[in-house]
Amino acid sequence: MTTSRTEHDFLGERLLPDTAYYGIQTLRALENFAITGIPIRAEPLFVQALAFVKKGAALANRDLGVLPAPIADAIAAACDRVASGEFDHQFLTDMIQGGAGTSVNMNANEVIANVALELMGHQKGEYQYCHPNNHVNCSQSTNDAYPTAFRIALNNKLVGYRETLNELAEAFAQKGEEFRDILKMGRTQLQDAVPMSMGDEFRAFATNLREELLRIDDSRRLIDEINMGATAIGSRVNAPTGYPEAVTEHLRAITGLNLSLAGDLFEATYDTGAYVQLSGVLKRTAVKLSKICNDLRLLSSGPRTGLNEINLPPLQPGSSIMPGKVNPVVPEVVNQTAFYVIGADLTVTMAAEAGQLQLNVMEPVISFALFTSISYMTNACRTLREKCVLGITANKAHAENLVRNSIGIVTQLNPVIGYEASAEIAKEALRTGKSVHDIAVTERGLLTQEKWDEIFTFENLIRPVFIR
């Protein structure tokens, strides 16, 4: 039979199973916040970051003589075990909760305290030896510990996302090189425009996404600023002199991140501007990615009645009623992911705006939205690369034939015969179905065959030079 222990807080007493490393405040959170059904253990980097923060605090408090070395060292050792993932299953509070993240902070305090107690040779719940509030939370408030852990976790989560986005951009660049000598028709407003290389089209996709890598780097620099030591509102109440600087230095060493202490701790405790910036970057990338997927769906449309310039890898039957139909399912799922991220950006915006006075209590939903968006974008980029982009093939002959039969190539004649004459040729070609070549060269004699051949070389079509 499972034995239990009794814990108390200022609201009363509760029974907890002896197997639980969490305590009474975590239990109350489990009862109060059944919202998403997604516990914070679903974000292991967040759990790890909470352990980093508590370790940094314990070491700073030890150095400043606030915590006895045996207790501080036991807390630090417990934090190492928590950071390794050993106790992820004990982090149960819902990602969205009231209290500005207090339940998350206390979940970490209680687990770390009980792990430390066992390391010191005591039983779980014997808090007179190592207390969640008095010792693990020493010189801290949820209002500096939670956002600091959040920023550390975001920073580390963005590393994997950035790498995946870069790999997707590289995949498009590789296709750009593979397709560099394939002639195709460029289109504006879904109408024929002028010829181009299919390689240039795919290289542009790569360039478009590579721009986002710089924006991620900008966002990470903003997130590097922390308010550790601000405690409740920025006044440093209950924190010893030198603590903010000391804990920041320890956190730099523990995390390997270029963390910096905010210059104005009052402002930093309520400000969520860095989250709005990051969310905007995620939205911007989602918009770009969705546009690219729209293009892939159009370029592969058909196969007989669409553009059919490229083939996407066939992954599954596309219809329960239409035999042989294959759909662009990966671009479609990336589109849908983008829609979610765009919506989550509005959540972050509203939550950031809802902050009042010295604290923004809506940070849990901001963390949920950003963690989720980064995870979804990472998965979408990986799926698009592995399941789609790497396997794209080109229908070279068909794409080139569309160019040769297009009315859009008449634009190349503007410098030679003028806009008005070119427009007349386009109009007649559209009305009669004749080729631009036959009307311009054979019927009207507006230029010689030699001049036509000079203008319409493959090289001049994809990398035009001015010819009169």
Image: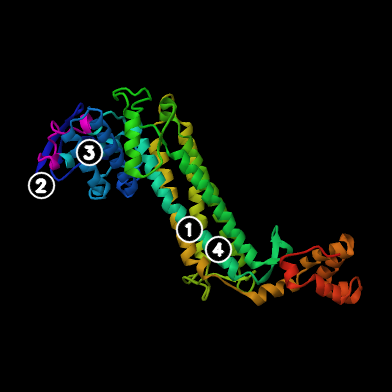
User: On the picture, is 170 further left or further right than 34?
Assistant: right
The residue under the point 70% across, 62% down is 187
Could you say where residue 332 lies in the image, as x and y percent from the top left? 52, 60
Q: Identify residue for label 1.
A: 381
The front one of 80 and 350 is 80
Residue type of the residue flagged with mark 3: Leu
Q: Which residues are magenta?
A: 117-135
Q: Local crowd at mark 4 within 10 Å, few (<14), some, or many (≥20)?
A: many
Distance in Å between CA atoms under marks 2 and 1: 46 Å
Could you say where residue 277 lies in the image, as x and y percent from the top left? 51, 40
Could you say where residue 452 lies in the image, as x and y percent from the top left? 83, 73
Q: Local crowd at mark 3 within 10 Å, few (<14), some, or many (≥20)?
A: some
User: Which of pointers 3 and 4 lies earlier in the amino acid sequence?
Assistant: 3
In the rendered structure, find residue 172 and report the number of the disc placed on it: 4
Above or below residue 269? Residue 185 is below
Above or below residue 34? Residue 401 is below
User: Which of pointers 1 and 3 lies earlier in the amino acid sequence?
Assistant: 3
Quarter occupied by the C terminus: bottom right
Q: Local crowd at mark 1 within 10 Å, few (<14), some, or many (≥20)?
A: many
The residue under the point 71% across, 75% down is 401
Q: Identify residue for label 2.
A: 2
Mark 2 residue element: loop
User: On the picture, is 186 further left or further right than 386?
Assistant: right
